[in-house]
Image (cartoon, grey):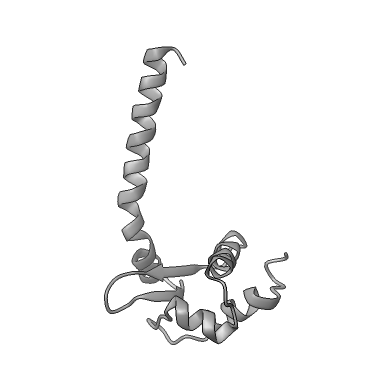
Amino acid sequence: MNKDQLTGHHELVWLTLTRLDEGETILGDALMSYTGIKDRRLFYQVINDLRKLGKLVGSSKHQGSQGYFEIRDQNDFNRWIIPHRKTTEELRLIERCMTAAWEENGS
């Protein structure tokens, strides 16, 4: 799929996100309903596909601004990425621990 030529569900989801007002979000269930996606796994796949194609799709679980949105500026990016930083740090720690354990055991 060409990132400049989205089709089907991908196009509908992206168009919906780009038409949101600045700072506005849309809940996943509402986005699914609006775009006709009935299967939650398909919905998540569409979101991931859009991200892989370079579309800046953000999401937030923060109370008061829950939902999906188009990342348009640094503030939007921060709103999306900050909750993931802790997970990233934890994964790096796990990787360091596993690497040390493998080196110690000769694996």
- Give residue 27's position: percent from left, percent from top: 42, 79
Q: Residue furthest top?
A: 106
> Is 64 located above or below residue 96 in the figure?
below
Q: How many labels does the image show?
A: 0
Q: Nearer the viewer, residue 16 or 37?
A: 37
- Give residue 62's position: percent from left, percent from top: 29, 71
Q: Which residue lies furthest to the left in this view?
A: 63
21 sits left or right of 55 in the view: left
Query: Which quadrant is home to the N terminus?
Result: bottom right
> Is 6 located above or below residue 102 in the figure?
below
The answer to which image quadrant residue 37 occupies is: bottom right
Residue at (53%, 79%) from the top-left corner? 32
Residue at (55%, 65%) from the top-left corner? 41
- Give residue 4's position: percent from left, percent from top: 69, 71
- Give residue 46's position: percent from left, percent from top: 59, 68
Residue at (36%, 47%) from the top-left corner? 88
Q: Which of 72 and 96 is in front in this view?
A: 96
90 sits left or right of 42 in the view: left
91 sits left or right of 47 in the view: left
> Is 54 located above or below residue 63 in the figure?
above
